[in-house]
Image (spheres, rainbow, N blue to C red):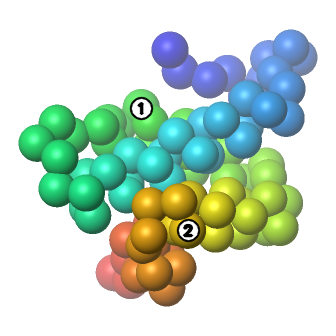
Amino acid sequence: MIMDLNDPELEFSDLVYAYQSWVMAVINDEKLNNSEKLLTEDISDEGLNAMRFLPGEVTNAIETSLARVYEVDEEELSALLFPED
């Protein structure tokens, strides 16, 4: 289900969930060597759209927390999330 950013019922927690899901899918696909890929275009789109509306402190906290949980270097995670073109 694609998140409707114009939905008046959309809550802050929905944005956090979308961003967190995207970060977790990137970690899963790039670092955990699972055969099942989790990152889909919908998850990517929703995560990036949610990031536009979340304060930097929130996105940073999500990234830092998940990097610690999955034992991924924060700088490496940042490079996976936002590769330089």
Q: Does residue 6 appear in this view? A: yes
- Which comes before the other along the chain, label 2 or label 1? 1
Q: Residue at x 11, y 42 (%)?
A: 35
Measuring from the top left, give residue 14's x and y in whole percent. Answer: 73, 29
Binning the other alpha carbons within 10 Å of mark 2 as few (below 14), some (14 to 19) or many (20 upward) gives: few
Q: In terms of secondary structure, where does tag 1 sit?
A: helix
**How far is the residue under mark 2 from the one under mark 1?**
25 Å
Query: Relative to 65, is 34 on the left or the right?
Result: left
Q: Nearer the viewer, mark 2 or mark 1?
A: 2
Hey, which quadrant is residue 3 in on the image?
Answer: top right
Count of marks, rendered view? 2
Hey, which quadrant is residue 63 in on the image?
Answer: bottom right
Q: Residue at x 64, y 62 (%)?
A: 65
Q: In terms of secondary structure, where does tag 2 sit?
A: helix
Residue 68 circle label = 2
Q: Amino acid at mark 2?
A: Arg
